[in-house]
Structure formats: structure tokens, C-alpha cells
Amino acid sequence: MKVLLVAGARPNFMKVAPLIPALIANGHKPYLVHTGQHYDDLMSAAFFKDLGIPEPDAHLGVGSGSHAEQLSRIMSGVEPQIANQKPDWVVVVGDVNSTLGAALVAARLRPKIGCRIAHVEAGLRSGDWRMPEEINRVLTDRIADLLLTPSHDADENLLREGIAPEKIVSVGNIMIDSLFSQLENARRLDVAKTRKLQKRSYMVVTLHRPTNVDDPEMFATILSGLQLVAEKMPVIFPMHPRSRQRVADAKLDELLNGVIVMDPLPYVEMLSLVDSAGVVLTDSGGLQEETTVLGVPCITLREQTERPITITNGTNRLIDWPPSAEGIRRTVNDAMASRRASAGVPEGWDGNTAERIVAALEKASSASA
Ligand code: UD1
């Protein structure tokens, strides 16, 4: 099989990394397209290096812009790639603009060149249509031929939406393949020690969702909460470029006094820091999943999560909404006090998802042959 994989933004890279060697090991031909939605070294190249991802076969350099500008550049860049390569499969991962842009192009080329679309991480739903990711996920799932889900709640969401059961394959969580492949390296690196942090007694924060950082009042409330926590323990905040921009725009710098702010961290360094943390406060989907597997308490700074299994089976909890500075401090204290190992890692979050994805692609190909 010739398999064209599309990646564009930071959380995509750990999802394609395990697929490339698994495809090659099974005699298939991967072709990697990097849309360039993320382009800073720390948002892109550092992940390729840490995760051993080969140079992309094509780099589209789409960069930032308004939603329409970015999506249209992704689509016009991906179109000739699919048209020329004529792959058997176009594999898209996650829920970013590059995921939807590539899936739309593939769907239009599908009747002409006979390619099919597989969506890795299908079926997650927040129910919140204000999130660009929710739109991206639902539309991608609607036009995909093969929906590869990370957990059974995702299967149920798809069935409820009327997706044919034979299109859905529960494969587990591909992020966890990357996590297990790098955990030993992360532990050897021991970032907590190098940064003179005591294990289990610091908090790691990541924030970048538009709902949290684009509204200056909301962002100020959250930063005030971080300051309260920072009175008691180190708060480490590797800051996404979008959030850094919003701090500057809304002149919120003073609210970061006492917080240890740094650039986004490469994959292995971040994994190391999170693995030894006392608690993680985040609005990222990936971190909710990683903390579940690592057994680190996680607080999600969102009204809801499309990953409820990290709450029922993992270490995650939602903040009381809307957040207040005092609420953040209280929830952090509660999470630290009730520290527990993961209630059980969800089925298929075992490091072998890439193999199951390749098997699902092979099976779907032979069924249609
Ligand atoms: C995107 C994804 C989001 C994902 C996040 C992870 C969409 C709709 N959103 O959000 O789901 O959780 O990536 O990081 O696809 N920027 C840089 N350098 C970069 C990339 C971005 O400075 O390498 C800045 C630019 O100012 C840009 C802004 O960040 O305008 C936002 O980037 P964009 O890719 O539009 O969305 P993210 O917020 O990164």
C-alpha cells in the first residue's frame, strides 16, 4: 500500500511518528506531507528530531493566518500531492486545521484516483461547537472511509451519529506509542533534577485554547490562579506562541511574576518534566492522555473534555467552570492531596496502536480488493 500521511501542527507529530516505521516494517510505502501549519523549531523540527521522524517528503510551508487563509493554503498545497502520488490511503490524524483540509481534498479526489481516507483519533466529541477542533473532528469523521478510534466512548459517538459500524475500528491511542518509545530517554534526561526541582512538588502548566487565552479577562483570571499556586510551589509554564502573543497584546506580563515561564519544550524534555510533576494544569488534549498513563494528577482547564476516559479511567478532572483564581488554587490542592495512580490505563493505550492501525488499513484494503 502507498500511504500518504499528513501532519501539520505539534500534536500531529507524535501521532504520525510511530506509523512510519510500522508501515515500512510491513512492506508498505509511507509518504509524509508536512503542511507547515506549525513552523517554529520548537513547535515542529524539535519533535521530528526527538521522535526520529524522517524528513517529510513534501513540506508545504503554509504557516499562520486567519482560519480561511490557513485552510485554503493547506488545501491548495495538499491537492497536487494527493493527485500526483495517487496513494491507496490518505491518513489524517487528530483535529487540527491540517487534518480537515487534507481530508476535504482527499474526499474530492477519491472518486477520480481511488484513494481512501483513514482518520486516526476518530470519534472524540466535546459537544462544544465553539472549538475549531470540534468542527474539524466531526467533518473529518463524516467523510472518512476508516475511523480509527482511541477508546470505546469514541466508537459510541460515531455509532450515535449514524456512521456504519464496519467503518469503525478501535485501535487504541497512538500518542501512547510515542510516549512509551521515549519514556526511558525522558527518565534518563531527568529534567526536574537539572532544573533543581523536587520531584512531585511542582506544577506544569500549558494553555493555548482560544477560549482561555484570547479573552483577556479569562486569561487574567487564570494567570492570577497560577500566581496563587506559585506562592506554595514552583509553577512551570512552557508557553505556546499563541499565548505569548496574547500576554503581550493584553499587557498581562505582571501576572506572570512568580511563575517560571519558558519557551515550548521539545517532546522528551516535556515528557520528563511531566513524568516527575506533582500536578499538571492544562487545556491540551494530549496532556490529559499522557498524565493518565503516567499516573500524574491532571486538571483540565476547560468546560468539558472530548476525552472523558481520562476522567473515568485516568487521573484527570475538570476545573469548576467558569474558573476563578481561588478555584484554581483549591482544585490544585485537592488534586495533590488525592494523588493516586491511574485508575487503570484505558484498553489499547499500550504502545502497540501503530501495528493495529497498519493491520486495519491492510484489512480494509483486502476487503475492497
Ligand atoms: C493549533 C490547533 C490546536 C492544537 C494546537 C497545538 C487548529 C485549529 N488548532 O492551535 O488544535 O491544540 O495547534 O499547538 O488547528 N505560531 C507561531 N509559531 C508556530 C505556530 C504558531 O508563532 O510554529 C503562532 C502564530 O501567531 C499563529 C498562532 O500561534 O497565528 C496560532 O497558530 P495556529 O496553528 O493557527 O493555531 P494553534 O493555536 O497553534
Image (cartoon, helix red, strand yellow):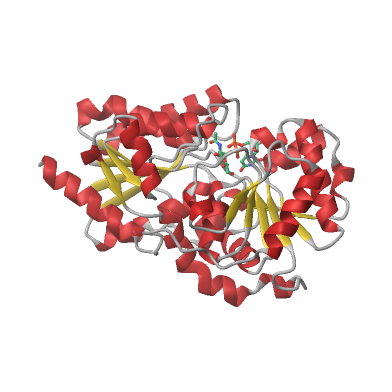
Q: Is residue 342 visible?
A: yes
Number of numbered labels in the structure image: 0
Q: Is residue 335 above or below residue 225?
A: below
The x, y position of residue 107, in whole percent, is 30, 28
State the image quarter where residue 38 is shown.
top right
The x, y position of residue 51, in whole percent, is 48, 61
The x, y position of residue 124, in whole percent, is 44, 40
Residue displayed at 17% across by 45% down: 365
Residue displayed at 29% across by 29% down: 162
Looking at this view, is 35 or 151 the one in front? 151
Residue displayed at 39% across by 40% down: 123
Residue displayed at 54% across by 42% down: 305
Looking at this view, is 54 or 192 the one in front? 192
Looking at this view, is 48 or 188 the one in front? 188
State the image quarter where residue 83 is shown.
top left
The x, y position of residue 324, in whole percent, is 78, 41
Name the residue furthest left.
369
Ligand 1: which quarter?
top right
Where is the C terminus found, in terms of image quarters? top left
Q: Is residue 261 above or below residue 71?
A: below
Name the residue furthest top.
68
Left of 85 or right of it: where is 14?
Answer: right
State the image quarter where residue 214 is shown.
top right
Q: Is residue 10 above or below residue 165?
A: below
